[in-house]
Image (tube, coloured by chain):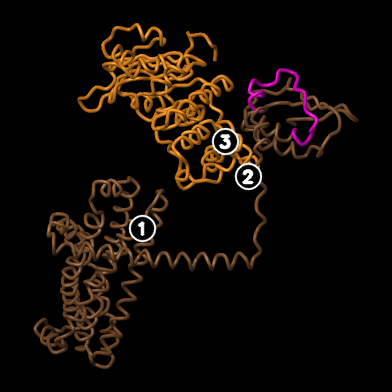
Amino acid sequence: MAESPDNPVVRVRGLVNRFGSQVVHDGLDLEIRENEIFGIVGGSGAGKSVLLRTLLGLRQPDAGSVEVYGRDVRHMSQAERISLVRSYGVTFQNGALISSLTVAQNIQLPLREYFSLTEQSLTALSELGLSMVGLPADTAGKYPAQLSGGMVKRAALARALALEPKLLFLDEPTSGLDPISASAFDELMLYLHSQLRLTVVMITHDLDTLFRTCSRVGVIVDGRMITDSLEGMLKNQQPWIHEYFHGPRSRAAQHG
Amino acid sequence: MKLSLEGEGDDWRLLLNGDWSLAATAVIQEELQALPGTLHGSLICDWTHAESTGIGPVWILLTRLGTLSPGGVRHVGNPPHTLQLLQRLQADRHALCAPPPAPAPSDIEEVVGNLGRWVVLQGTEGRAVIGFLGRISTVVREIFSRPRALRGSSLARHIYETGVTAIPIVSLIAFLISVIVAYLGAQQLSRFGADIFVVDLVTIAVLREMGVLLTAVIVAGRSGSAFAAEIGVMQLNEETDALRAMGMNPIELLVLPRVLGLIIALPLLTIIADAMGLAGGGLLSLVNLHIPLPQFTARLRESLSPTTFWAGLIKAPVFALLIGMVGTYRGMQVRESARELGRLTTVAVVQSIFLVILADALFAILFVQIDF
C-alpha cells in the first residue's frame, strides 16, 4: 500500500443511500489517505452513521462504489469480506462490549475466533491491549457494567486493536466523557496513531477532539461530502460549515 | 523455527526468522518457553530475517526477554517500529506490578464462607421481598384515597394481554388434558363395568384441580416471563429511575396494574378452562364410552357438590397474586446487564410455577381439614 494520495485507503464514489423517499447520501465522494486522522462531521441526521455502516459493509448502498485498499466492497465473496473486516478495527458509540464477558475476555474474543492460541498467550495479549490503552491491570477481570464511561471507551479501543488493524473506525470516541477524560483519550489516539502507524476515521461532534487530532475533515452537507484541511474549513463560506466552525462553541475550542 | 539462540559464555545472539505476525503467536510462545531460564552476559536480538512483525508476538517476546536476560538486550537488524512503544509499556507494567494474589482459602473455610454468604443472601432477599409486598400494599391503600392511582387504561391493557390473548392456548390445553384423563380413566373403570364414573372423575379432577392449576402454569410461563422481561428492560434503560425522578411511583405505574390485571384475568381464564375441560370429558364419553350427552350432564349434576366449582376457582386469585408478584419483583431486580435479565426472567418463571404448586398443595390439605 503506497502512501501516495493516488492510492487512498478508502475511496467512495457517487454513493447514494435512500430510506424510502428520504435521500440521505446523494452522490457522496470520499477519499481517505494512508496514515491520516480523518474526521467526519455533520448535523444530526446528516447520515454520518449510515456512511460508517456503509464503509464497514454492514449496509448495501443504493448506488455508487466503496473501495477499501483498492477492492470494491460490493463485489466481494463472503470470505474476502471477512478477511477485509478483520483488517479493520471498529469502536461503537456506546462501546458495545459484550456485557456477559469480562474486559479481558472481550479483548480475547476476536483472537479466540480467528487464531488457535494458548490461554497463556491470550492472557499476555489482553494485558498488552490493556496497557496500550492505559487501563490498569486489574481491569482485566471486571465486567463492562463495573467500568466508568471513559474506561468502557478505552476497553472498546483495546478490543478494536486486538487484531492489529491498520485502519481504525471510531464512532463518537469522546462522546459522554468529561473534558479531562476526553482530552486524555485524544492524546491516547494521537500516540497510538503515531506509534502503530494507523489510519483513523472518526465520527465526532467534539470540536476539541477535531482540532486536536484530525489532519483532514469531511463535512456532510445536503447528502454530499466537502473535504478539506482544518484551515481550509475555517475559511469555507458554505452556511452550515461556517456556522459549525464559527459558532460560540467552536471559537472556544480554537482559542482554548 | 521462529527463533534460534547462538553463542556461549557471555556472548549470546537470538536470531528471529520467518513470519512474526499475530497468526504465529502460538508457535512463537512455544519456542520461547523452550529457551533456557536465564542467560548470563549480553544478549543481542537480531531482527534481520523476521517478517511482517505483529505487536502481539513482539510483546510476548519482550516479556520473555525480561527474564531471559535481566541485564538488558540490544536490538539490531531493523527492529519493528513498535518496539519502542512496547518496551515502554513493559517498563510501565513492571512499575505497577499487580499485588500478589491472596492465599487461597482452605476447603473448610471455603465451605463455611459459601454457606455464610448463602444465609446472608437469603436473609437480605427475604427482607427485600417483604419490603416489596409492603410497597405494593401502600399503593393499594392509596387507591382508596386517590382513585386515579388505579390506572384504568393500563389495567385494561394487562387484562387483555394476560387474559384475552391466552384464551386459545388455555382452552386447547384444558380440552386435551381432560380428554387424556377421561381416556385413561375409562380404560381402568370399564374393567369393573363402572364406565359411568368417568364422568365423576373428569368433573372433580377438572373443576377442583386441573382447570385452575393448568391455567396458572400456562399463565406463569406466558405472563410471568413477560412481566419480568418488560420491567427488566425498563430497569436497564433507566426508565424506572426516570419515573421516580419525575415523582411517579413505578410500583403504582408498572407493578400494580400487572398484578391486579392478572388477579382479574386468571379466575376468568379458569372458568373457560373448566368449561373446555368438561366439554373434552363429554366428547370422549360420547365417542369412546357411548354415553349420550343428556346422561353425561345428568351424571355431572349428581357428582357435583355445591363446593366443587368454588374449591377450584377460589385458588385462582391467590395463584395470580403469586405469579404477578414474582414476575414483577424479579423484573425490578434486574441491574446492569443483559445476562441478569435472562437469568431473572428464568428465575421468575421457575419460582412462580413452584410457588403455584406449593400453594395448591397447601390448599388441598386445608380443604380436607375443613371438609370443603
SS label for mark 3: helix
Chain of the residue under the numbered disc 3 shown in the image: A
- B305 with respect to A9 (left or right): left
What percent of the width, then of the height, locates residue B137? 24, 66
Look at the numbered disc 1 and give the secondary structure of its residue: helix
Q: CA distance from mark 1 to mark 3?
A: 34 Å
The three-letter amino acid code for the residue at tag 1 is Thr
**Which residue in the rendered view is the most extreme toward the left?**
B294
Q: Residues within 10 Å of mark 3 (few under 14, many from 20)?
A: many
Q: Amino acid at mark 2?
A: Glu
Instruction: Tell me the colour chain B is drawn in.
Output: brown
How many residues crowd mark 2 within 10 Å: few (<14), some (14–19), many (20+)?
A: few
Give the colour in which the image draws chain A. Answer: orange
Tell me the quarter of the picture where residue A112 sits. Answer: top right
Q: Which mark is residue A130?
A: 3
Q: Which residues are magenta?
A: B65-86
Residue A242 found in image quarter: top left
Question: From the viewer's perspective, is residue B23 above or below residue B309?
Answer: above
Residue tagged 1:
B345
Distance from the alpha carbon under mark 3 to that under mark 2: 16 Å
The verdict on a common chain for dots 3 and 2 is yes
